[in-house]
Image: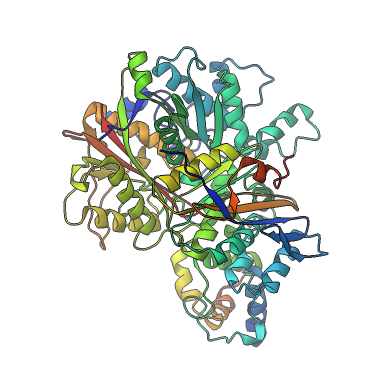
Amino acid sequence: MDKEKLYIKSFCQISNQEVCLNDELIFRSIESDFNVFAKEIYQKFEIQYPKFHKMDALCKLAFLSSEFVLNQNYNSETAIILANHSSSLDTDVKHQKTIKNQENYYPSPAVFVYTLPNITIGEISIRHQLKSESAFFVDEDYPIELIHQQAEYLIKSGKTTQVLCGWTEYFQNNYQAFVYLVGKEGNVPLESKFIKERIINK
Amino acid sequence: MSRGVAITGMGIISAIGNSVEENRLSLLQNQSGIDKIKYLETVHQSKFLLGEVKKSTDELIDFLQLSSENHFTRTGLLGLYAVKEAIENAAIFDVNEEKTGLISSTSVGGMDFTEKYFFDYENFPDKQKYIISHEAGDSTNLIANEIGLKGFVTTISTACSSAANAIMLGARMIKSGRLDRVIVGGTDALSKFTLNGFNSLMILSDELNQPFDENRKGLNLGEAAAYLVLESDEMVKKYDKKVLAYLSGYGNFNDAFHQTASSETGEGAYLAMKKSLEISGLSASEIDYVNAHGTATPNNDASESAALKRIFQDSFFDFSSTKPFTGHTLAAAAAVEAVFSILALEEQKVWANLNFRKAIETFGLIPQTNIKSKNIDHVLSNSFGFGGNCSTLIFSKA
Amino acid sequence: MENLIEELKHKIVEVLNLEDINVEDIDAKDPLFGDGLGLDSIDALELIVLLDKDYGIKISDPKQGKTIFQSIETMAQYVTDNRTK
């Protein structure tokens, strides 16, 4: 396949109590607790999706960041490739707490449902009815080359015209989301440098 | 049209055997590995049946000749065990002699040990080494280090379709020339975390699982690790490799319906099967055996039946779920069933769907209840995961 | 029974994270699943846990939920008849 250029159509960053869309700050909060911060975003932008409140923190983070990006660029065949470092560890710990105490043993199915990182993709897919291909990777740092290779493959083979890629990391109130929509057109050429400047690695 | 990506080796450890040969024998003898709980320490000991690997964790450590300082949890040990068999089976003696990668998958990660030692970390500092092992990516890294692999390594975590996605990604990397060889598959050990979690969803059965049966009550969990070695045609030629089978088709689609339940029409499953047929260039009638996901939950089997009927329409087709043998091995499932699909091609047999008595009334589909010998050129294998992640793989005779 | 119905309304909103819904807006006869409050299968399982935790009622077959959780009223009746706490 020839080396056709790919572009970033839109990108969203959520970290440090701020939401940036295409490098423009669209919301800032004084709230340091992520769950409260997330609710503020939901209310401020009048999202109206009651299932949001049932999601765990990781899903809320992935849901919100992709919401802004997909709203302007909706396509029912959008593929999704996400990654993070901690998998669903934050919720795993919560589930673990509900099963460790024999005297107070009430495991919650609603919590258990979220003990997999790819449920983030499930939630985004359900919201936007995307029945496309998806994958979730767990890695030390954002595997830029791997993800871009996959996105390139999906677009060039004609499987889809755009791919939602990104890093959605959450663990015990430490959060960072950087998601971006890749396609054949856009303002920003798809380059590793651009991504590296915006994802803070440990 | 290309035959697909060559599979030159495989390795497996499951409830029905500690090697490919042992698994083969169990399938040929209709010998299930699901039984009362023996190794996992849980309060549910007397209630549930599990597909446990018949080796204790210490036995695995001994067999793999690891030092007592090792950070491996049971998940990693099972994974290493199967990876080693796969590499040996593929006659690879230097894992770095060509561009080689490892793509593994897991859902439990190191949770199996973290939950055991959660309370001990303070008083037993020697157990603290397992804290790092908790992360999903760690078992993959430990395996890569142990076999000395310096190439590409990553971990996929998409629940019960994980290994299928690992296999798919590996195949793509071979086809695009990014890798010459890739070890792909998954591993998951049993843990209280998953047992209690699945129990809270009320989809476990306290009896032997009955896939596609009208009266199915739910699944039996299992543990396993399985890996395939995929190689490019150049490698096969260069090293004069014996090809076990070809991965000729694959597809992945999202059901977009619910976090853990599948849609009534089996949309994601249907799309995944359809795509895999497209890629392989085969029509549904050319599929000789369907190794179904068949977890025996009321929801999955109904949804999968709907999808199968949409693909095969009025034509008769041979299918079975092998989960009555091994239990549902979560992230390893697709890889375990890939090995079973390849064994079906080798033996020219459709494996039995054990414990079946009565067809689901709505669909009337009857699986193969006993081993069937027939000409098998192509096997289709389904794996559907929570989060709506549906994957299908097609394996073809070499 | 009035008190129990109010109690259940509050618990359901809390346990199921129904943040966009006001307790006052829920009618005791409203269907909980389907069109009414739009609960799903996981919510049903959470309600089963709620019955066990707060009222000591154990349900072993999830299919029983269909009749028990038809509305807050049917739920209140079931709790009244079967509670051990």
Locate the C terminus of chain B and report the quarter of the image it occupies.
Answer: top left
Compare residues A111 and B90 and report the one nearer the observer. B90
Can residue B107 be seen in this snapshot? no
Note whether A152 is above or below A56 in the view shown: above
Question: Where's residue A133, x and y in %?
Answer: 44, 50
Question: How many numbered discs?
Answer: 0
Residue found farthest to the right:
A30
Note whether B384 is above or below C36 in the view shown: above
Question: Where's residue C28, x and y in %?
Answer: 57, 86
Note whether B166 is above or below C85 in the view shown: above
Residue B309 found in image quarter: bottom left
Query: Which residue is drawn at the image coordinates 56% and 20% (left, top)?
Result: B149
Residue A51 found in image quarter: bottom right
Compare residues A136 and B136 and report the one nearer the observer. A136
Image side of residue B90 versus residue B150, left or right: left
Residue A107 found in image quarter: bottom right
Locate the N terminus of chain B and report the quarter of the image it occupies.
Answer: top left
Question: Where's residue B213, x and y in %?
Answer: 30, 53
Query: Which residue is drawn at the image coordinates 24% and 36% (left, top)?
Result: B378
